[in-house]
Image: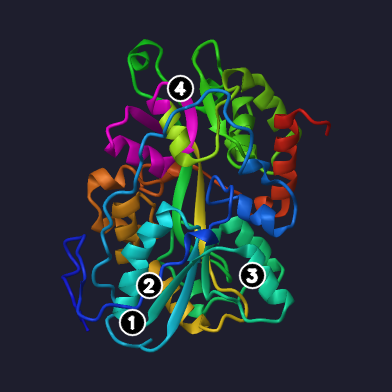
Amino acid sequence: MIARAPAAPYPSTVAEVRPPVYRRPPIALTPPGRSTRRRFLGVAAAGLGLGLLGCGEEDLIDPGPPVPTPPRAATPVGAVAGYGDDRWSGRTLRLAAYGDDIQDLMERVVWQPFAAATGCSVEPAVVDLSRLAADRAEGRAPHVDAMLVDAPWAQGASERGELAPLDAALTGRADLDLVDGTDFAQPAFAYAMVNAYRRDERDSLVGVPRTWREWWDRQRFPGDRTLRKDALGTFEFALMGVGVAPSDLYPLDLERAVDGLRAISGRIVDRWWETGSQAVGWLARNRADYGSAWSYRVAAAQANGAAVELVWDQGLLLADVWVVPAGAANADVAMDFARYATRPETQAALAVSAGLSPVTSDAFARLDPLTTATLATAPRNLPKLIRQDVAWWAENEIHANAAFNRWLLGTPS
């Protein structure tokens, strides 16, 4: 059994009397050449050769090693309401995520405590959509029981009949009030792509751009820029940069978005970032003055002493979700895990440890004001953000990325 620490004050730790069985996957499972833990997966699953997003040309200027932005010290979740028995003793839950530093931290913060609290063994893996497709094609049960994926991929997979419907206890939860789920996808955590900048004397001299229209104003705000080497986020920001109102973004006008990028590309040149650490590293090392960046990466860089700041206004709110592949052998354990992973106690632990934003407002009662200020779904930050149109991206991701790549490489439409 588990020696339980009191639920408040948060955070607390778990003393494990019976250590869970926990097997780490071999590093070779990580897909080669992937620069981020998102969009490439859905494109690869479609069987299209748009790997340019993950393994594009080398930078013309060596940015040097990225500024280290490790997640904060792992803080395992403490006692979670409704857990602390041996309900899944003798069962093995196979969980898959993206295989990067966030997965490493989630294994320690959430997956291992769930194993300790329920008696199951957790077998971690890296998301491998091609293997999942092979499982379906060859009539095998899925090789994993639950996966952490981006919301647009989950939307498309549910429409293709590739996911199991979630239990009614998961889909009917009123406490998941900050990010919408579906009958097939449980929000895991949220984050934002935001307007970030290098903090220096220019702040008091010329100010900083508060909107993307101002960010696109090269005369008022001179300096080098960096944007993500991907249509997601970059197209939304380009459209706002040329005057599209946030409320009018979707459906995205791909041609106008490319025109917007053409207007600012002279200030970017070789600074199209492919990893979150690269974005904040360029800002911190004076390689760029302004850029888009993941909000939790900016917070980690600040904790490391980097002189970078962010603007929440007109940032793009996104979420990763838990899904259960259709036919999963341990779907019942996976459903219970999804409930555990989205309880307020667990969400607060992820926020403290990695800066990942809670999907339930109940988590904020367990967080201090300094941590809360860094989170996308905090009461003061969430109203400033634009929610990703998941349905649009699920339907149009391939076309948007193709348009972005054609323009970036200078190939005909």
Q: Which residue is mark 2?
A: 340
Its colouring scheme is: rainbow
Magenta region = 283-311
**Circles 1, 2 touching at the beta carbon (< 8 Å):** yes
Gap between marks 4 and 1, in whole Å? 48 Å
Question: Label 3: how many residues lie within 10 Å, few (<14), some (14-19) or many (20+)?
Answer: some
Q: Which residue is mark 4?
A: 287
> Residue 264's spot in the image, x, y percent?
62, 21
Gap between marks 1 and 2, in whole Å? 10 Å
Mark 3: amino acid: Leu
**Circles 3, 2 touching at the beta carbon (< 8 Å):** no
**Circles 4, 2 touching at the beta carbon (< 8 Å):** no
Question: Label 4: how many residues lie within 10 Å, few (<14), some (14-19) or many (20+)?
Answer: many
Q: Quadrant of residue 228?
A: top right
Mark 4: amino acid: Arg
Tell which circle, 1 or 3, labels the residue nearer the N-terminal end. Answer: 1
Tell which circle, 1 or 2, labels the residue nearer the N-terminal end. Answer: 1
Q: Along the line of sight, which residue is nearer the eye, 189 or 360?
A: 189
Nearer to us of marks 4 and 2 is: 4
Q: Is residue 80 above or below residue 69?
A: below
The C terminus sits in image quarter: top right
Q: Which residue is mark 1?
A: 118
Q: Which residue is mark 3?
A: 132
Residue at the (72%, 54%) spot, across then down = 395
Mark 2: amino acid: Tyr
